[in-house]
């Protein structure tokens, strides 16, 4: 690449009228070891652009497949719901049974009380029996 | 879109996103975070991604907006950018020597450019985008892009000449 041409492109470059291809030529020129001394001052500029393009993004991006997340969430919810219903039902049954037991007990107590009253009255019959036996024995 | 498919689409330009973010945010960590954020945002949109004609341009615009928002909120919160991958001239001799490195200069010179010029210079001279693409990405008129680019290049040249005439390089 002849020097005059480079100088011309360089001039255009600072007016921002160069094409991408022309700019590539400039970068190539300034990447050489020997360049015209009066152009030496531009070297860092073009070299820097080439070096700056080498920088890489090396970090790993944690791309979570979000679909899975919802899937597992629904699985967990279903499990919790099933167990909840199962144990809830058991608990309810136990409660019902206890209630039935209490009610039955009350009913039996009522019955027992009334039977007691009945036996009290039967006690009079014993008096009657004794009196009858006395009479029979005396005869 | 499956994860592997998505990665195939994103892989070719993820470095460009990162470099753009780093140009604007300067700090490596900040730029990495920003890139990750953008990629995750893209991933969350992966179902509708087929509709975009140019995913790269879309992602680039997203990155630009994201970084500018970041910078704005930083300024509003009166926070200074803290970054470690940056050599401070006053610290030590070793660091000073590093700072004299021409790459270091260039980085510093570009850092001092206004944001718009920074972006234009990054897109054109580092990534070699065409003018029309830059117009679309930055939502600027072609003449405005040219003016910004010319100013940016001249500023870099003048700064370099200044350094050069000190006889350090």
Image (cartoon, coloured by chain):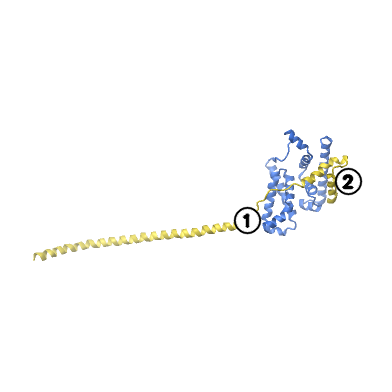
Chain colours: A yellow, B blue
Q: Give the structural element (helix, strand or loop) at label 1.
A: helix
How many residues crowd around disc 2 within 10 Å: few (fewer than 14), some, or many (20 or more)? Answer: some
- Give the side of residue A111 with respect to residue B71, left or right: left
**Residue name at image x 26 percent, y 62 percent:** A115
Which residue is under mark 2?
A: A6
Position in image of residue B105 (x %, y %): 78, 39
Taking the spot 88% from the left edge, 46% from the top edge, the residue there is A6
* Disc 1 chain ID: A
For disc 1, the marked residue is A66
Task: In this rendered view, identify the residue nearer to me: A79 or A55.
Answer: A55
Q: Quadrant of residue B28?
A: top right
Q: Looking at the image, which is closer to me, B71 or B96? A: B96
Residue B35: image location, x then y, percent: 70, 49
- Observer able to see residue B11: yes
- Decide if residue A116 is on the left or right side of residue A26: left
Q: Secondary structure beneath disc 2?
A: helix
Tag 2 subunit: A
Taking the view exactly as shown, the residue that stands out farthest to the left is A139
**Residue A123: x, y in percent?**
20, 61
State whether residue B117 appears in this view: no
Q: Quadrant of residue A93?
A: bottom left
Where is residue B119 shown, x and y percent of the image?
77, 47
Q: Which mark is residue A126?
A: none
Instruction: Mark 2 or mark 1: name the one nearer the start of the chain.
Output: 2
Q: Nearer the viewer, residue A59 or A13?
A: A59
Q: What's the distance in space between the residues labelled 2 and 1, CA to CA?
A: 54 Å
């Amino acid at each position: 690449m002849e020097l005059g041409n480079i100088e011309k492109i360089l001039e255009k470059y600072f007016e921002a009228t160069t094409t991408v291809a022309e700019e590539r030529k400039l970068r190539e020129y300034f990447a050489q070891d020997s360049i015209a001394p009066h152009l030496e001052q531009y070297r860092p500029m073009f070299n820097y652009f080439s070096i700056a393009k080498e920088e890489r993004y090396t970090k790993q991006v944690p791309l979570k497949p979000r679909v899975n997340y919802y899937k597992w969430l629904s699985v967990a919810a279903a499990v919790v719901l099933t167990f909840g219903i199962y144990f809830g039902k058991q608990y309810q049954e136990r409660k019902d049974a206890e209630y039935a037991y209490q009610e039955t007990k009350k009913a039996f107590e009522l019955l027992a009380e009334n039977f007691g009253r009945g036996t009290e009255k039967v006690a009079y019959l014993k008096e009657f029996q004794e009196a009858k036996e006395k009479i029979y024995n005396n005869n | 879109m499956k994860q592997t498919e998505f990665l195939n689409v994103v892989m070719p330009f993820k470095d460009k996103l990162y470099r753009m973010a780093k140009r604007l945010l300067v700090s490596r960590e900040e730029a990495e975070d920003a890139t990750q954020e953008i990629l995750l945002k893209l991933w969350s949109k992966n179902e509708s991604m087929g509709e975009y004609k140019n995913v790269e341009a879309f992602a680039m615009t997203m990155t630009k907006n994201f970084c500018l928002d970041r910078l704005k909120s930083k300024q509003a919160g009166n926070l200074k950018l803290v970054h470690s991958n940056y050599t401070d001239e006053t610290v030590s001799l070793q660091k000073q020597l590093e700072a004299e490195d021409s790459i270091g200069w260039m980085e510093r010179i570009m850092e001092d450019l206004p944001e718009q010029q920074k972006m234009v210079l990054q897109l054109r001279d580092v990534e070699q985008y065409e003018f029309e693409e830059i117009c679309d990405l930055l939502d600027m008129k072609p003449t405005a892009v040219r003016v910004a680019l010319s100013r940016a290049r001249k500023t870099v040249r003048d700064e370099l000449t200044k350094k050069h005439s000190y006889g350090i390089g």
